[in-house]
Image (cartoon, rainbow, N blue to C red):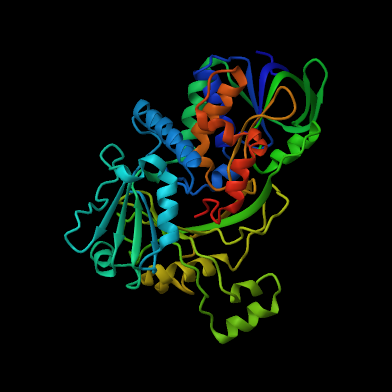
């Protein structure tokens, strides 16, 4: 195949672009297929993924979407001998509220008609709750266990803050290796004709076909294509603008840290834990003075949102843990390939995580030197749903706006986008994940009235 004349050009070699190309090549036998990206595959936002997945969302459409993606990931885990390191200890959402009615309503809404079958309530010590002793995804239960009562939670999670009164254990959830998933897909589709070219897209013109100008190795050339898939992640709006289309997405920079938990502050068998409660961080007088003097950091003195993440990383015998906190939810930014990270973030997220897991406080001011501080963009629509399927421009298809769920949503996005490209039937929920949803007034009114956008 000449790489200057293709049927389908996928712009973006993150996990979403790779997954779209994979399903086009493997399921729909499209061989004249080229992926282009300014960087190497899986090198930008995909390299900064938390690599978690869950099948619960506070809306049935997104629950259907993530269930579909999990089905597809499990299929690949089976086919590859679990090369993607899929585990399933679940997501544990905790709060100090004894009766978090709004949260429980969202839980029921997300599971829709399946709620009665999938939600199990537990109170008291003989509750029948089965903790996640094994990471094996084959044997893990489905649905969610709701633990209510401080004593019950302490019995199973003794390292948590003793004030935690409610825990939601989402069982069809865990983590995978996004890098291995991407590599498996690239290796599988390469013999089928799909190719990758490192090149920067600089212009798109349309006559009878698309003429896409790229820069590769300092030289400019033109790629002719019948169809374009815009899977450019944080740069999707820039790509769309090249062919005269505006996308309703913004970018939010979010950060994480990882370090070796040599003090064993976090139980290796703990699910991915999320402290849902907001808090005001505890600073010394000197720290408060320094933060107050810097306008960009003074907000750290104010009450902060919840949803601080913590999980073990590297399996039962590993040592590392990951901490994350998407507290920049309203702070949009123009994307760059090497974003500037907040130097205070490691200390900030550690303080926040120490509230749920007090043993982490031993690392305050003493984080290991070999820690990793990293960040990536959440490209998102205002309702935090993806954009998958036909763009307004004929011949262009979207696989974008996957915010903080790119790894877990990649397989479903690739499958749905590939079906849209070839005109194959799609599941009923797919329309609500495309630009067509903005013509559905009832759905948009419902989403506008909802407090939660599924950000955890």
Q: Nearer the viewer, residue 239 or 2?
A: 239
Work out whether 320 lies above or below 354. Answer: above
Q: Nearer the viewer, residue 84 or 369?
A: 84
At x 71%, y 22%, the residue is: 395
At x 21%, y 64%, the residue is: 124
Give coordinates of residue 299: x percent, y percent. Answer: 64, 72
Work out whether 328 lies above or below 390. Answer: below
Name, please, the residue furthest toward the bottom.
Answer: 285
Please indicate whether residue 302 sits to the left or right of residue 88 in the image. right
Give coordinates of residue 72: x percent, y percent. Answer: 43, 30
At x 73%, y 29%, the residue is: 392
Q: Nearer the viewer, residue 247 or 45?
A: 247
Work out whether 4 lies above or below 35. Answer: above
Quadrant location of residue 230?
top right
Please indicate whether residue 25 sits to the left or right of residue 144 in the image. right
Name, please, the residue furthest toward the front.
Answer: 442
How many numbered badges does the structure rendering display? 0
Please indicate whether residue 417 sits to the left or right of residue 314 in the image. right
Please say whether residue 310 is visible from this viewpoint. no
Give coordinates of residue 8: x percent, y percent. Answer: 66, 20
Question: Where does the N terminus fall, quadrant-wise?
Answer: top right
Quadrant location of residue 420?
top right
Please say whether residue 96 is visible from this viewpoint. yes
Give coordinates of residue 21: x percent, y percent. Answer: 57, 25
Please indicate whether residue 451 sits to the left or right of residue 207 in the image. left
């Amino acid at each position: 195949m000449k790489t200057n004349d293709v049927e389908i050009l996928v712009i973006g070699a993150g996990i979403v672009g790779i997954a779209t190309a994979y399903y086009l090549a493997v399921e729909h036998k499209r061989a004249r297929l080229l992926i282009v990206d300014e960087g190497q595959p899986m090198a930008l936002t995909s390299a900064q993924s938390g690599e978690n997945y869950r099948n619960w969302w506070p809306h049935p459409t997104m629950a259907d979407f993530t269930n579909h993606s999990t089905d597809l990931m499990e299929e690949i885990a089976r086919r590859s001998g679990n090369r993607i390191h899929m585990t399933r200890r679940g997501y544990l959402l905790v709060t100090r509220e004894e009766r978090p009615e709004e949260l429980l309503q969202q839980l029921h809404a997300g599971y829709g008609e399946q709620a009665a079958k999938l939600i199990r309530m537990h109170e008291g010590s003989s509750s029948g709750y089965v903790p996640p002793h094994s990471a094996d995804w084959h044997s893990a239960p489905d649905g969610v266990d709701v633990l209510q009562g401080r004593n019950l939670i302490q019995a199973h999670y003794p390292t948590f803050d003793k004030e935690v009164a409610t825990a939601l254990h989402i069982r069809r959830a865990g983590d995978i290796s996004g890098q291995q998933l991407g590599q498996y897909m690239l290796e599988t589709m390469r013999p089928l004709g799909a190719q990758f070219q490192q090149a920067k897209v600089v212009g798109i013109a349309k006559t009878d076909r698309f003429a896409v100008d790229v820069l590769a190795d300092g030289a400019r050339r033109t790629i002719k294509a019948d169809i374009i898939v815009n899977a450019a992640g944080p740069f999707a709006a820039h790509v769309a603008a090249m062919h005269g289309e505006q996308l309703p997405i913004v970018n939010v920079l979010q950060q994480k840290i990882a370090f070796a938990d040599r003090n064993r502050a976090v139980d290796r068998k703990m699910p991915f834990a999320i402290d849902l409660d907001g808090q005001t961080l505890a600073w010394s007088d000197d720290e408060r003075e320094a933060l107050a003097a810097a306008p960009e950091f003074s907000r750290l003195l104010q009450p902060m949102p919840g949803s601080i993440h913590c999980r073990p990383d590297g399996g039962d015998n590993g040592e590392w843990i990951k901490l994350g906190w998407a507290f920049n939810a309203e702070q949009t930014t123009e994307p760059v390939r090497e974003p500037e990270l907040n130097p205070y973030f490691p200390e900030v997220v550690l303080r926040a995580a120490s509230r749920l897991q007090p043993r982490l406080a031993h690392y305050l001011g003493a984080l290991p030197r070999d820690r990793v501080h990293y960040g990536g963009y959440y490209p998102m629509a205002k309702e935090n749903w993806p954009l998958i399927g036909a763009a307004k421009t004929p011949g262009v298809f979207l696989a974008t706006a996957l915010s903080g769920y790119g790894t877990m949503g990649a397989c479903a996005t690739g499958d749905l986008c590939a079906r849209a490209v070839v005109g194959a039937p799609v599941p009923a929920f797919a329309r609500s994940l495309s630009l067509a949803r903005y013509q559905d007034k009832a759905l948009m009114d419902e989403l506008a009235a909802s407090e939660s956008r599924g950000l955890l």
